[in-house]
Amino acid sequence: MKNIIILTHGDFSKGIAQSSRYILGTVDNMTALSITLNETIQEIQNMIESAWKDFNNEEPTIIVTDLPGGSTTRTAIQCVAEHKDFYLISGLNLGLLLELIMLDLTKDDQTNLELLRSIVENARESITLVNDIRVDETDDLEGEL
Amino acid sequence: MIKVLRVDDRMLHGQVAVAWTNFFKVDTILIANDDLITDQTMQMAFKLATPPGITLSMKSLDGAVAVINNPKHAARSIMVITRNIEDAEYVCQCTENAVKNILIGGLRSSAGKKQVDMNSYLDDSDMNLLTKLHDAGVSITMQADPTSKKLLYADVLRLFNK
């Protein structure tokens, strides 16, 4: 079990949360937060804290942000510094979010970091220039029959 | 072993590749379709849709039957996918009780089909084939994603005849 807070510029967070539910059905303990140009860093931090309090549980929390260099990530970094069981991943995409939703985190920090590293690695590898895919390598059981 | 046979007219897509493979913990996806084996574009799309770590095989109906009947693959946890119920029934018939569960998902509307579930439409011939499979002991479920409403054979029959 874990909580997910999606934090993005504008409504990307709400849209991608809806897309994930379209594929996986009901998703519990996930909140989508949007920032605009109007909030101060402190206000954004309060949004995150308040979303976390609303989960009202002892589970670890993953914050996912859109841009590593954006105010979303900048603020989230501060929250992570203040909570031992917060994790922060930047570079949101749908494949990554689906993997995070299906992930079970543990109470052990090192185990959780290992799990998250592997998901981030898979997400990085999933970005593809489709034109470069070779069509003669598509059947993994080819030649086995 | 065959964990499940999914019937879905989009075959391998997000819901199946992500939600159902995770739900059934399969390590192999076997798509059984006679058009697919000559359509390299579709093959490429399905290759892309396959999650990391999962083996994908795309075969003709008879090719898929050969995979299922080959004891060499017995250790795999396989999800078979067919595009329609007719193909599913063919695979079942040729693989002697290897398929114990059929999961019907997206069977979108076409002429002469009746709506049974949100994304699933059947005609008389589909319903007769499902009855035949059910009578042969295959468990029939209709469900879009793992958290949506689950219809069993009796529910499907009742809704179809409504």
Image: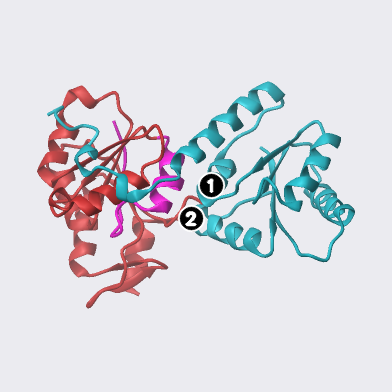
Q: Which mark is residue A98?
A: 1
Say whether marks 1 and 2 touch (CB < 8 Å). yes
Where residue B19 appears, x then y in whole percent?
46, 47
Pointer 1 chain: A
- Spatial separation of the CA atoms under disc 1 and disc 2: 8 Å
Q: Quadrant of the C terminus of chain B?
A: bottom left
- Residue range in magenta is B1-25
Which image quarter: residue B98? Answer: top left
Is A99 included in the stretch rendered in magenta? no
- Asked whether the residues under marks 1 and 2 belong to the same chain, the reply is yes
Chain letter for red, please. B
Q: Residue at x 10, y 42 (%)?
A: B62
Q: State whether residue A100 is above or below residue B87.
A: above
| Residue A74 relative to residue B119: left or right | right
Which image quarter: residue A111? Answer: top right
Secondary structure of the residue carrying numbered label 2:
helix
Identify which residue, B90 or A120, lies in the foreground: A120
**Amino acid type assigned to the residue bearing label 2 in the image:** Ile
Q: Quadrant of the N terminus of chain B?
A: top left
Chain letter for cyan, please. A
Where residue B159 appears, x then y in whole percent?
37, 69
Q: Residue furthest right?
A: A42
Pointer 2 chain: A
Q: Residue at x 48, y 55 (%)?
A: A23
Instruction: Look at the image and tell me whether residue B38 can be seen.
Output: yes
Secondary structure of the residue carrying numbered label 1:
helix
Residue under label 2? A23
